[in-house]
Image: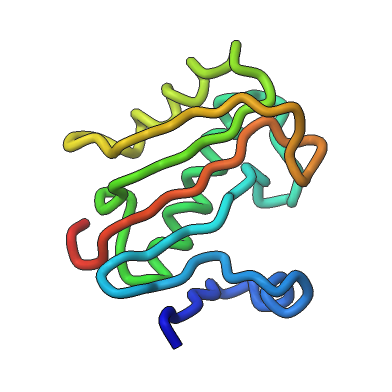
């Protein structure tokens, strides 16, 4: 095996049903699958800042299950169905991620797997460096 799947508590059914890991550890890195900003009720918040905050909260939880945190993120790719709301994303990102800043690519797209979602984010983080 070249990697170890990371399956945070509560994601076991997703792993079994859709056959992908929320994250995977390979060497000194953890690769986090795309995360949608669902709130605690399973819904995507109406407010774009709250949606982005939900993305980062879920990201932090997934990274913690892998043994690291948001401070260890070295690369981030975000997908946006509405690029005019990039400011909302940056606001939420800056609340939880500081210097040194990671590499970041923002991509505009027409839709995401959940049609209610406007943002999906995937990251790569280094283990033991958060």
Q: Which coloring applies here?
A: rainbow
**Viewer-proximal residue, 50 or 110?**
110
- Residue 9 in the image: above or below residue 68: below
Which quarter of the figure is the C terminus placed in?
bottom left
Answer with the quarter of the image where residue 31 lies: bottom left
Q: Position of residue 75 (x, y in %)?
A: 34, 44
Which residue does the image show at 57% across and 75% down from the upper left? 9
Which residue does the image show at 74% across and 51% down from the upper left? 42
Report the side of 29 relative to 49 (left or right).
Answer: left
Residue extending furthest toward the bottom: 1
Residue extending furthest toward the top: 84
- Residue 124 in the image: above or below residue 94: below
Report the side of 9 relative to 47 (left or right).
Answer: left
Q: Position of residue 120 (x, y in %)?
A: 60, 40
Q: Position of residue 23 (x, y in %)?
A: 50, 66
Residue extending furthest toward the front: 2
Q: Position of residue 109 (x, y in %)?
A: 68, 28
Which residue does the image show at 39% across and 73% down from the upper left? 25
**Viewer-proximal residue, 77 or 49?**
77
Q: How many marks?
A: 0
- Residue 74 in the image: above or below residue 115: below
Residue extending furthest toward the right: 115
Which quarter of the figure is the N terminus placed in?
bottom left
Which residue does the image show at 49% across and 28% down from the upper left? 106
């Amino acid at each position: 095996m070249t990697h170890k799947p990371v399956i945070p508590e509560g994601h076991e059914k997703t792993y079994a049903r859709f056959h992908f890991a929320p994250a995977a550890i390979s060497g000194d890195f953890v690769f986090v699958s795309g995360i949608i900003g669902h709130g605690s009720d399973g819904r995507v918040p109406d407010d774009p800042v709250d949606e982005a905050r939900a993305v980062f909260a879920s990201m932090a939880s997934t990274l913690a299950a892998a043994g690291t945190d948001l401070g260890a993120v070295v690369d981030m790719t975000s997908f946006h169905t509405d690029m005019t709301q990039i400011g909302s994303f940056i606001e939420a990102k800056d609340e939880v991620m500081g210097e040194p800043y990671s590499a970041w690519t923002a991509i505009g797209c027409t839709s995401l797997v959940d049609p209610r979602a406007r943002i999906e984010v995937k990251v790569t983080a280094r283990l033991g460096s958060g």
